[in-house]
Image (tube, rainbow, N blue to C red):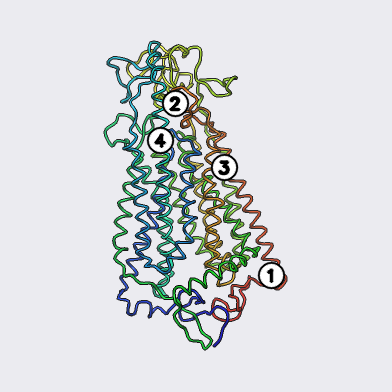
């Protein structure tokens, strides 16, 4: 039977079209291939583990960003760009990988590309060995046999005899710190380029291979398993970050505690773990047989014939621009796309910033902040599964799914508004706003002659009886130390201070985590409804292309600029920056204005969610208008054939 439009193969339960891969019944998928049922199961296991490790790696970087900032004097804007460069590379190559990967052995292609991920992980480790911690002694260093407090030499006491030594080494130390910071930053960017390339095939080729080779009754189950493993990755990545940041950087014994400002966790160890596990998973993928499913087309007499690869390529190129033009003219699709873009900003505004926010705002050690930040990952798994169950039980159609999206977004907005109001007292840091430079200065008249430094390694806060935190014992004017107490402190009324911040009591942590968890669970409920609506507002032959364009737009408009935007917002809330060798060269942030941090990150995220709610309202109005006018939303191909092979429409 002649058919100028797409043909739907009922036996395979999947559309087969010109220029696309032939879809064959499940019984034919493995016949003559030499691949047993164990083969597809092995691939599902390997693909699921690859997706799992991809998210573990991605979120692990998020969990150690604060540590990298302190270790290499990086700003939040710089670390935000480190996160974004992975998405830039992924966005740039994923279309080509998915397109040309059709003609390759997909398991081997996935394994080969993931070797770039292994190389990127190992490259992340390199700065630890290439740029070791400097041994420079800052002003106030106690010469001779200095006593120690919790493993830290008392090199931050007030000492007026070391200025000459300090001035002599300023230029050398400044150059060394600056060079190591820039070099490490460059290495991290190159590593992210490699990992962005390596992860581009996992979904694009993995999911299509499962759909092509799994029996019809099992394909959705296998895809669900792979998707669930992908959702488990963020939680595991944060737990890995919590484990490694609790260990000393050199894996040797240290009397410093993880909550100490001078403590640097073993940030590089997690990359070694990821590299080893991904490399092991590549081995079975390389053993899969080298073959590709041929392409086919339907002739005028109804027979199916094999299409040469070169001809299939030409057909796909010819149809690319018309398909793209049709999607861009679909107002409902563009509106749905914008909803996804706005919703994704909650990832950059809350999830990526969350470990740092918990550490700064609630005065937690890095490992505890990472462990607690894993809660939204758990909520994402719960919400994603629950959303599918609710859609199935309630049998929601297109309008019902959009209303479901609207409800979910409203609840998330209410949650953001609540947690934005949950605050903890700001540390009362001794200092003043310099009227000349308009910068916060910790130099006072009482410590002006102490040659105090504001370098990262000199940041050793002490607390006075009046609940005032000083940058270091030197800035408190302390000249001696004994029995765990600093004494003879010229800037303190009673002359005594203890190590650490003056943390005021704060009971907002549990309410914050509770509301965040609930909001993330409800916010994750709309994952399935969004996909459902997207499939219902485009024709059947446009579905895969619509998903690809949607992914491209989310990467371009939210995942790439999001970390940079929120990194700049976080930087703008910094009160006190590390100064390299007391110059204007700025390092990492040492003290944040917690109120500004809280309002900016949650407030801007709330604005994006408000925009998302507006686009959902527009989408609902467009769908309802079509319904009122009798133009029901159709999930059909260009010939009017529905998903079930008959001419019909999908009611709203």
Query: Going by the image, does 271 lie left or right of 505?
Result: left
Q: Marks 2 and 4, how far apart in space?
A: 24 Å
Q: Circle 1: is it few (<14), some (14-19), or many (20+) Cα within 10 Å?
A: some
Q: Nearer the viewer, mark 1 or mark 2?
A: 2
Q: Circle 4: is it few (<14), some (14-19), or many (20+) Cα within 10 Å?
A: many
N-terminal label among 3 and 4: 4
Image point (43%, 79%), residue name: 24
Q: Circle 3: is it few (<14), some (14-19), or many (20+) Cα within 10 Å?
A: many
Q: Which mark is residue 538?
A: none
Q: Which mark is residue 627?
A: 1
Residue 619 image offset from top left, x and y in percent:
65, 61
State which quadrant residue 167 falls in: top left
Which residue is tagged 4?
365
SS of the residue under disc 1: helix
SS of the residue under disc 2: helix
Which residue is tagged 3?
602
Query: Going by the image, does 540 lie left or right of 58?
Result: right
Q: Is residue 320 visible?
A: yes
Residue 93 image offset from top left, x and y in percent:
47, 57
Q: Marks 3 and 2, how far apart in space?
A: 31 Å
Q: Nearer the viewer, residue 261 or 414?
A: 261
Residue 10 image offset from top left, x and y in percent:
49, 81
Q: Marks 1 and 3, how far apart in space?
A: 37 Å
Q: Nearer the viewer, mark 2 or mark 4?
A: 2
Image point (34%, 68%), residue name: 41
């Amino acid at each position: 039977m002649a058919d100028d439009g797409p043909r739907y193969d009922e036996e395979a339960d999947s559309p087969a079209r010109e220029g696309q891969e032939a879809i064959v019944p499940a019984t034919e998928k493995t016949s003559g291939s030499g691949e047993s049922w164990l083969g597809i199961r092995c691939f599902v296991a390997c693909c699921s583990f690859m997706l799992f490790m991809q998210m573990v790696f991605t979120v692990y970087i998020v969990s150690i960003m604060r540590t990298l900032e302190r270790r290499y004097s990086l700003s939040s804007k710089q670390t935000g760009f480190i996160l974004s460069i992975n998405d830039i590379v992924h966005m740039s190559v994923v279309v080509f990988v998915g397109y040309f990967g059709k003609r390759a052995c997909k398991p081997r292609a996935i394994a080969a590309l993931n070797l770039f991920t292994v190389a990127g992980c190992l490259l992340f480790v390199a700065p630890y060995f290439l740029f070791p911690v400097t041994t420079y002694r800052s002003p106030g260093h106690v010469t001779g046999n200095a006593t120690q407090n919790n493993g830290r030499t008392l090199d931050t006491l007030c000492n007026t005899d070391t200025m000459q030594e300090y001035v002599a080494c300023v230029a050398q130390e400044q150059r060394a710190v600056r060079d190591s910071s820039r070099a490490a930053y460059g290495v991290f960017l190159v590593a992210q380029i490699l990992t962005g390339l390596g992860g581009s095939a996992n979904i694009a080729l993995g999911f299509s291979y499962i759909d092509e080779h799994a029996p019809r009754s099992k394909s959705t189950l296998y895809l669900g398993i792979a998707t669930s493993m992908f959702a488990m990755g963020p939680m595991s990545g944060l737990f890995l970050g919590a484990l490694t940041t609790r260990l000393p950087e050199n894996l040797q014994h240290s009397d410093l505690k993880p909550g100490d400002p001078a403590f640097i966790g073993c940030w590089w160890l997690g990359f070694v773990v990821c590299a080893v596990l991904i490399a092991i998973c590549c081995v079975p993928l390389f053993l899969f047989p080298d073959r590709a499913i041929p392409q086919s087309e339907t002739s005028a007499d109804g027979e199916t014939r094999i299409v040469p690869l070169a001809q299939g390529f030409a057909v796909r190129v010819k149809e690319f621009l018309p398909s793209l033009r049709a999607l861009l003219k679909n107002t409902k699709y563009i509106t749905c796309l914008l909803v996804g873009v706005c919703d994704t900003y909650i990832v950059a505004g809350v999830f990526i910033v969350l470990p740092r926010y918990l550490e700064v705002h609630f005065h937690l050690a890095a490992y505890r902040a990472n462990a607690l930040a894993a809660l939204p990952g758990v909520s994402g798994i719960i919400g994603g599964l629950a959303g599918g169950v609710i859609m199935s039980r309630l049998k929601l159609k297109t309008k019902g799914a959009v209303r479901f999206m609207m409800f979910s977004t409203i609840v998330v907005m209410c949650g953001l508004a609540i947690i934005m109001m949950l605050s903890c007292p700001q540390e009362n840091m001794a200092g003043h706003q310099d009227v000349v430079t308009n910068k916060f200065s910790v130099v006072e008249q009482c410590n002006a002659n102490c040659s105090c430094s504001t370098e990262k390694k000199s940041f050793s806060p002490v607390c006075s009886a009046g609940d005032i935190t000083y940058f270091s014992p030197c800035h408190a004017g302390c000249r001696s130390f004994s029995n765990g107490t600093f004494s003879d402190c010229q800037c303190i009324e009673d002359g005594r201070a203890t190590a650490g911040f003056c943390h005021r009591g704060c009971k907002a942590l549990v309410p914050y985590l509770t509301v965040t968890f609930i909001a993330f669970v409800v916010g994750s409920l709309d994952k399935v409804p969004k996909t459902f609506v997207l499939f219902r507002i485009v024709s059947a032959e446009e579905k895969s292309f619509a998903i690809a364009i949607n992914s491209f737009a989310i990467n371009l408009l939210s995942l790439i600029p999001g970390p940079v935007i929120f990194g700049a917002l976080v930087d703008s809330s910094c009160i006190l920056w590390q100064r390299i060798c007391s110059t204007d060269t700025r390092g990492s942030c040492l003290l944040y204005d917690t109120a500004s941090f809280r309002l900016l990150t949650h407030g801007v995220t709330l604005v994006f969610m408000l925009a998302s709610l507006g686009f959902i309202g527009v989408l609902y109005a467009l769908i309802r208008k079509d319904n009122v006018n009798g133009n029901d939303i159709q999930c059909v191909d260009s010939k009017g054939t529905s998903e079930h092979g008959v001419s019909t429409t999908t009611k709203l």
